[in-house]
Image: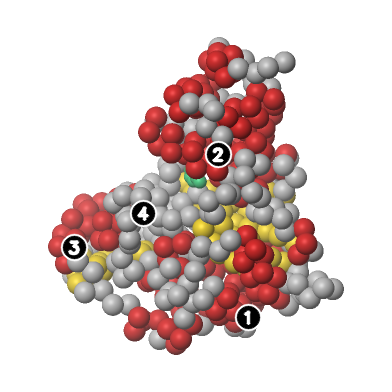
Amino acid sequence: MNLHITDILRHKRDGLPLTTAEIQHFVRGVTDRTITDAQASALLMAIFLNGLNPQELTDLTTAMRLSGEVFDAGPLGTFTIDKHSTGGVGDKTSLLIAPTLAAAGLASPTPAGVPGICVPMISGRSLGHTGGTLDKLETIPGFNTQFNLQQFFDTLKTCGASLIGQTPTLVPADRILYGLRDHTSTVESPNLITASIMSKKLAEDLNALVLDVKTGSGAFMRDYADSKHLANLMVQTGTLAGTRTVALLTAMEEPLGRFSGNWIEVWECIDIMQGRVHDMSEDLVVLTDVLSGWMLHLAGKADDPQAGARLSMQLRESGAAYQAWLKIVAAHGGDTSIFHDPAAFHKPTATRTLKAETSGYLASMDCTEVGWAVQRLGAGRLKPGAPVSAHAGLEMHIKLGEKVEPNQPLVTFFTEDESLLAEPYEMLRATLHFTPTPPTIQPLIREVITAP
Ligand code: URA
């Protein structure tokens, strides 16, 4: 029986579930452009309003995943695992987790000599108020994130991890649908976010996936119940697709770690991997070990996630993660000589420090505002494809719940264009709220969602 997009639209509009064949027809038509943008947008809005049942969501995710080339990790004969964050401020755990897992994989090769664990990490660029792993990595001179799938495969085989951008042929349906969502106010749909993220992650051919679902003032989903709903949908979709999937709901109420920007985030990670953990980086290290701990547990290297977290700490403190990092960066063409003195590579042309006016406890901030301040210093882009500043960003000197005295430094701003300093300075001054008594602070790890 022939399928017609107008019938499919009517079914979803009237609240009927779509069949697998109807969803496949839709995604095929979007990808080969036989379905018009108007028709595709109409279905996106119908999905936004009427939702999808678990079978429809799985069908949509699968059809999108298969809309282009998919990575085939089979010939590696290894355990493949990745971590995905829904996006935050100062969130640089990927730069620590990939080498940590790679170190564990390099230490336990398969009989064919391939690392026993591989992390095929396909990452994104800065989006809205959140930073992007590719923009951070590309501040390392020579680092190439635009590998084809063969180069990706070869790097995984020798290094145990590779971090690249989405190729033009991988999940083309998402590129088209995401563009339409951006123009039709249909981005904030838990079903559409799940299909978009999971189609790309599952195209990496993963045995397991750990999701860091952010919640709070710096997350795309601020409300706890909404974040939890999204986490449940992603775990359900990954599990139904045959990938062991776990989601951690983590607080994004303040920037993670010490720095937020591009090179300065890489610098913070190098310091940590070289054994220098700044007080402001403690939360970053804790979250990294918890996420890596889950990954090492799912990969069979630890009996439980707690033992995995201890192994993650050992891999970092022994220097094994740093050795794996050097190997990965070199394989991507990056200049590792700058890691000898990462502070010296930080060259903003203007800086300014915000200081406390009165004494008090830092009680809250709108972390999305902080993210926008980072982007407006030059770390983000005003339009797609525009370059980002390597050296722009900010350094937090205080965490939520800590006490300050008048004149104590709160935030230092860095930029390569002095005219960009004033607005972010005022944004931070307005958004940091102090109280006379200690506030209640949310724990960093709010909840872990595993498959039923
Ligand atoms: N990131 C994605 O890749 N897709 C979404 O829909 C939201 C965030």
Quarter occupied by residue 429:
bottom left
Give the mark nearest the N terminus, 2 or 4.
Answer: 2
Element class at badge 3:
loop
Determine whether the beta carbon of the residue marked 4 sits less than 8 angstroms from the nearest atom of ligand 1. Answer: no
**Pair 2/3: label in front:** 2
* Quadrant occupied by the C terminus: top right
Cα separation, mark 1 vs mark 3, equals 39 Å
Residue in front for this viewpoint, 274 or 59: 59
- Measured as percent of width and height from the top left, residue 162 is found at 60, 66
Q: In the rendered structure, find residue 173 and report the number of the disc placed on it.
A: 2
Q: Is residue 57 above or below residue 161?
A: above
Q: How many marks?
A: 4
Q: Amino acid at mark 4?
A: Gly
**Nearer to the camera, 148 or 10:** 148
Q: How far from the left and from the top, in percent, is residue 344?
A: 34, 84
CA separation, marks 2 and 4?
20 Å
Look at 48% across and 82% down and name the residue there: 336
Residue 233's disc is: none
| Quadrant hosting residue 141 | bottom left
Q: Is residue 332 left or right of residue 370?
A: right
Q: Nearer the viewer, residue 387 or 414?
A: 387
**What is the C-alpha distance between the residues marked 4 and 1?**
36 Å
Horizontally, residue 365 falls left or right of residue 170, namely left
Is the C-beta separation of discs 4 and 1 under 8 Å? no
| Residue in the image at 72% along x and 58% along y | 73
Amino acid of disc 1: Ala
